[in-house]
Image (tube, rainbow, N blue to C red):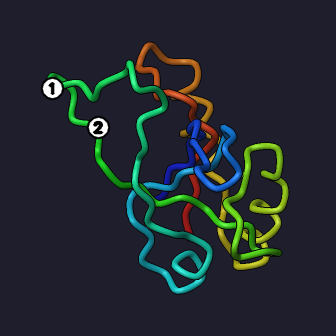
Amino acid sequence: MYQLTSEVYLDKYSKCYKKIIVITPPPQEPELKKITRLINREKLSPFKERSECCSTEQCFYAVLNPNNMCDLLCLNELPILFNSLITNKYKIDYEITKMLQHSDVKIRNLICYFYK
């Protein structure tokens, strides 16, 4: 089972912030490996340091735009990803997603869970 979340990402080339889609755990299936890229988590601000108390991973897997593999997929382009997932026979787990969104256990910027 995979988890999709959104995360603010500083694109150093365009010099702008983007809300991108992140997938965990690291993809194993070829269809998902093809549309993801391991990227470094940049500091969003020179004033914000990584916390010693909380283990934030240095790298994460971001989802690429299946229509343009050079670009990271932004949150507002989520329908493109859902279309690709459904085409490749993945299922969105509405029950677990809904349960976690309404529970006291908050997963920051949760979009959904899915599986094959």
Q: Most extreme residue toward the left, as rendered?
A: 52
Amino acid type at circle 2 is Thr
Amino acid type at circle 1 is Glu
The quarter of the picture where residue 66 lies is: bottom right
Q: In the image, is 54 to the left or to the right of 107?
A: left
Task: Measuring from the top left, give residue 5's x and y in whole percent.
Answer: 56, 42
Name the foreground residue: 65 vs 106: 65
User: For the point 37% across and 21% down, which residue is it?
Assistant: 48
The quarter of the picture where residue 50 lies is: top left
Instruction: Locate the C terminus by quadrant.
Output: bottom right
Task: Measuring from the top left, give residue 68's x and y in whole percent.
Answer: 79, 74
Q: Is residue 88 above or below residue 4?
A: below
Task: Measuring from the top left, give residue 108's x and y in whole percent.
Answer: 50, 27
Name the foreground residue: 103 vs 110: 110
Q: Secondary structure beneath disc 2? A: loop
Q: In the image, is 24 to the left or to the right of 72?
A: left
Q: Secondary structure beneath disc 1? A: loop
User: For the point 39% across and 65% down, which residue is it?
Assistant: 26
- The disc placed on residue 29 is none
User: For the point 82% across and 52% down, which residue is it?
Assistant: 77
Q: In the image, is 88 to the left or to the right of 53?
A: right
Task: Measuring from the top left, give residue 52's x and y in whole percent.
Answer: 15, 26
Residue corresponding to mark 2: 56
| Gap in angstroms between the C-alphas marked 2 and 1 | 9 Å
Q: Residues within 10 Å of mark 1 (few under 14, many from 20)?
A: few
Q: Most extreme residue toward the top, as rendered?
A: 104
Name the foreground residue: 18 vs 26: 18
Q: Residues within 10 Å of mark 2 (few under 14, many from 20)?
A: few
Q: Is residue 26 above or below residue 34?
A: above
Residue corresponding to mark 1: 52
Q: Are marks 2 and 1 in contact (CB under 8 Å)?
A: no
